[in-house]
Image (cartoon, rainbow, N blue to C red):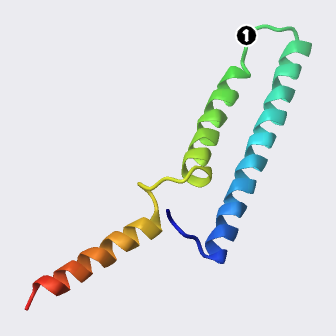
Amino acid sequence: MRTFTDAQLHELAHKRVEFRTHLMVYLVINAALWIIWYITGQGYPWPVWPMTGWGIGVIFHYMFDYRQSRFLSEEDEYQKLKKKLEENNHITP
């Protein structure tokens, strides 16, 4: 299991709160767009387009900031490099 420093936990908490804020703004604004669409005559469902584009951004925000991704983890990459360097130092005479 991975251990976190206090600074890392604080940064992770900050990123998660930012994601939740982003998600709430997305939901409120898109609800407002759908209400405007409904009030103005319900023609072509144009709110789908900003909702889709922005939704892709919300998904990427989740993937990179909320969820723990080992693929993009700076700490994991550092540990791999450190381990490789230690192995190379032990192998060479």
Q: Residue at x 74, y 41 (%)?
A: 23
Q: Give the number of callouts.
A: 1
Q: Residue at x 69, y 30 (%)?
A: 50
- Local secondary structure at mark 1: loop
Q: Residue at x 83, y 17 (%)?
A: 37
Q: Label 1 crowding class (10 Å Cα cut-off): few <14, some 14-19, many 20+? A: few
Residue pushed farthest front? Answer: 1
Q: Residue 89 appears at what percent x and percent y? A: 18, 86
Residue pushed farthest left? Answer: 93
* Residue nearest the viewer, comparing 11 with 44: 11
Above/below status of 91 relative to 38: below
Which of the 4 image quadrants contains residue 91?
bottom left
**Kind of residue at disc 1:** Tyr
Which of the 4 image quadrants contains residue 40?
top right
Task: Write down the residue under mark 1.
Answer: 44
Above/below status of 38 relative to 71: above
Q: Quadrant of the C terminus?
A: bottom left
In this rendering, would 47 be left or right of 2? right
In this rendering, would 58 be left or right of 64? right
* Residue nearest the viewer, comparing 85 with 47: 85
* Residue nearest the viewer, comparing 12 with 61: 12
Which of the 4 image quadrants contains residue 25?
top right
Q: Residue 78 appears at what percent x and percent y? A: 39, 73
In this rendering, would 65 be left or right of 29? left
Q: Residue 12 appears at what percent x and percent y? A: 65, 63
Above/below status of 22 relative to 26: below
Residue pushed farthest bottom? Answer: 93
